[in-house]
Image: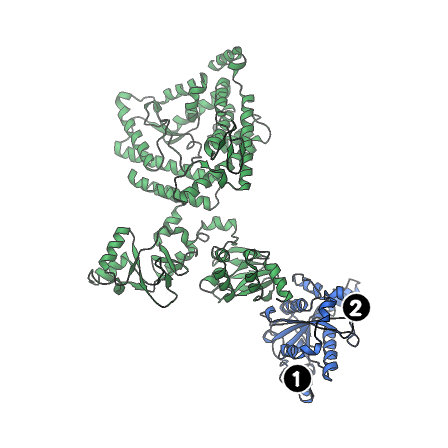
Chain colours: A green, B blue
Amino acid sequence: MNIEQLDIRGHLAQFAPFDHLSDDLLDRIAGSIEIRYFQAGSELLSKDQPIDSLWYIRSGAVEMYQRSGRLFNRLGEGDIFGYSDLLHQRRVRYPVRAIEDTLIYFVPADIFDEICEADDDFSEFVDTGGRLKVTVQQQRDDSGLMTTRVRKLITRQPQMVEADTTLQAAAQRMRDENTTCVLVVDLTESQSPYTFVGRDGRHWKLNGILTDRDFCTRVLAEGKSPQTPVGEVMSSRPIVIQSDESVYEAMLCMLRNQVHHLPVLHRRQPMGILHLSDIVRHETHSSLFLVNNIFVQNTPTQLSRLSTEVRNGFVRMVADGANSEMISRALATIGRGFTQRLLELAEAELGPPPVPYCFMVLGSMAREEPTINADQDNALVLDDAYDPEQHGDYFEALAKFVCDGLAGCGYAYCKGDVMATNPRWRQPLAVWKRYFEKWMREPNPERLLHSSIFFDLAPVHGEAPMVEALQDLIAEQAPRSELFLAALARNAKNRTPPLGFFRQFVMEQDGEHRKSINLKRRGTAPLTDLVRVHALACGSKSQNTFARLDDIAATKLVGQGVAERLRYAFEFLSMVRIRHQAEAIEHGQEPDNSVDPEHVGSRERHHLKDAFEAISHAQKFLSFRYTLPGKGSSRSQGAERGETAS
Amino acid sequence: MRRVPKVRRRQLEAWPRYLAARATEAKDTRLAGFFAGGGLDPEMPIGEAPLVAMDFETTGLDAGRHDIVSVGVVPFTLARIRPAEGRYWVLSPRRRLSDESVTFHHITHAEVENAPDFSAIIDELLEMLHGRLVVVHYRQLERAFLDAAIRERLGEGLLFPMLDTMSLEARIHRQSWWARLRRWAGRPVASIRLHESRQRYNLPAYTGHHALIDSLATAELLQAQILYHYSWETPVGALWR
């Protein structure tokens, strides 16, 4: 190898995906490089121009543009481009312009193909566009259309039949498999752009596609017999798309070719069928679209069908890099949407309410931070004119309708029975006021344990002022109810964060090892508990933990920077939990709150430790701030009780 | 700031006339073959010209007293440089390599001891240069050393037009009215050495003083110079010397 090729090789070897190549392959590339200099401002590649090399930036910088002329990507030294065009139609899709004087190394297409063939990591890298540095702005603008690959939308294998299959058999297959099309394939000896190796190891050729629409236009309308072989009516040489194309590209392809079904191939292997509705659905996963959808459903059953879309939307938001606050608020909006629509449907079925009411949510939904696996916690506040004899049946039925409906939509019944179906939590406003006054005036830690959930409350449907009246009452009385705060503070320390955190286990307070951490029980829940204590102490009417932290930070209740640290801890713990749940859903598992330390990366582990530490400190501080007077002196307890009662 | 070089008819025709004369007069068949049909049409746009960058490392600067110790050549066009087709030879100097030039060129005594004489590479070198416009950085050195080495071994010299990136750089940075004004004003003169010239076009730094790397560096520099100061349409006759 010549010395200048060593120089080239040395440069390539510093950058992905070349850094992981074997020496032989690296030599092969370095020995094939061609070079050209481009002046700043010049166009390197123009749209639709044929491309015969992989472009590697030896020095300088370039920008890539979309059809719209919008900046798509900016690349610098050691970056490569042109690979997706090389892998596909060998034509340039995005024009590239030099923004600095740029020296390009070219890897000829045949060498590129050879390396892709020889090295899986390399081909994976160029296949998935591993280095594609799409700007964050871009991701937001395009809601993932440009960046989401077609394969993401494929959920099942395509149905394939041979050309001599009868139309009837094909139709039965489509019925049984609940699909809207079949691919028509045949055994073949020779290779062509359409051949692939089937699971049986033999060579197959994709010959055509038969859709449900074809059954109308090409079978029935043409008077074909059900015994006709599919080969006679199929569309030959179907339009296909590669699995790593963008959803945007797929959409354009459908529009361009006027097709609704697009076979998705990985190289030549059919992976699935993309239908236009898949793209529409993908787009409507965005939370706002989903909320719109909620309000046009007319039965609880129809509503319940949306729940899978909620999960998909959740997974997508996580993949799109939304933060925990955005995701939680979206989930809260959706949860409220379901509840509101169910109440509308209930009122439509049961008639208008005999007395005004407000349906309120409690706990995480009220805080606007539910997770994807949140239970339902709700209650009914009724007008004081409520008469159990007269109106009891109506509200019981209403509550049952809504709670059952919510359960159908994926919001499990509350284990503690904090639901509007529980007669205790279906009461006139005056009774609710008495409940809260009693909780605050005669706090008993054991009893409060079960009622702290009521101190996160928000109206969802009906007369919101009734719930706001309760919020006002709490905000007014809680700061003065020191005994209540002390009891709450004591409860807030019941659940502690884990002490230490090692590679395979978690060190518990009592010195025991555990295999997994429950991020809710040991992390977010104790954090929201302690934030609630401070929030109630400062008379905040906010329900959301972040909003409460803002209110707390404005007071002198906690030390400098503590609120900020807790905010960080909360965001981090929520995000770990959310990602964990999104991953579970993607793997077809039920999302939960328990994380195995082995699956936590070293950097995350470090942050987790910090987050748990922040909670632990804040818990210790609680005992300081809100002492339980009963322990020290019974005198002060009596005094405070008297004061609170006055 | 594209430069439109003034080209005099005579200047354009001087080299073709010389090459044609040598093709008939040369006694050595290899040289006669090289000159015959080897010259480019002076009107040929530089963008279409087959080019070859060449660089020598020598034991000194005087072609009469010093020797070539290595030769690097890289064929290219303005569209593509092809390092894979480049060639590199280490040669045995007739006179002993001084210790200074050893450190300077990274060529060791041992390498040189087993190296062939220049005569062994004449055929291959001529084949590489044939039909291409030779591009060098500082033609006085390459031209004089090549001429001397050939003359010594074949009994007659070898001269042909060369495109000199250093003199292009000098025209731009030393002979322009602006450069003269700067000099008159006492400002430092722009360096036209290979490395410094490349920096002006934001070309990456290479380890210098290796004949093959320097010829690659020269090829890249020419691509940049043409883009910045001339055009692909500039006739080669306006650029060669």
Q: In which quarter of the image is the N terminus of chain A?
A: bottom right
Q: What element carries label 1?
A: helix
Mark 2 belongs to which subunit? B
Is residue A569 positioned above or below A486 on the image? below
Circles 1 and 2 on the same subunit: yes
Give the quadrant of residue A426. top left
Q: Which residue is drawn at 23% across and 59% down?
A: A167
Mark 1 belongs to which subunit? B
Image coords of residue A632 (percent x, y): 54, 14
Horizontally, is B209 left or right of A104 in the view?
right
Give the quadrant of residue A361. top left
The residue singled out by tag 2 in the image is: B98
Image coords of residue A591 (percent x, y): 41, 39
Horizontally, is A504 left or right of B76 in the view?
left
Say which of A278 and B25 sits in front: B25
Q: Which residue is drawn at 67% across and 89% down?
A: B24
- The crowd level at tag 1 (other Cα within 10 Å; few <14, some 14-19, many 20+) is some
Say which of B70 and B169 sits in front: B70
* Residue type (three-letter) at the residue carrying disc 1: Arg
Of circles 1 and 2, which is in front?
Answer: 2
Asked whether residue B184 is in view, the answer is: yes
The residue singled out by tag 1 in the image is: B30
Q: Is mark 2 on a helix, strand or loop?
A: loop
Is residue A606 positioned above or below B142 on the image? above
> Disc 1 versus disc 2: distance between alpha carbons?
33 Å
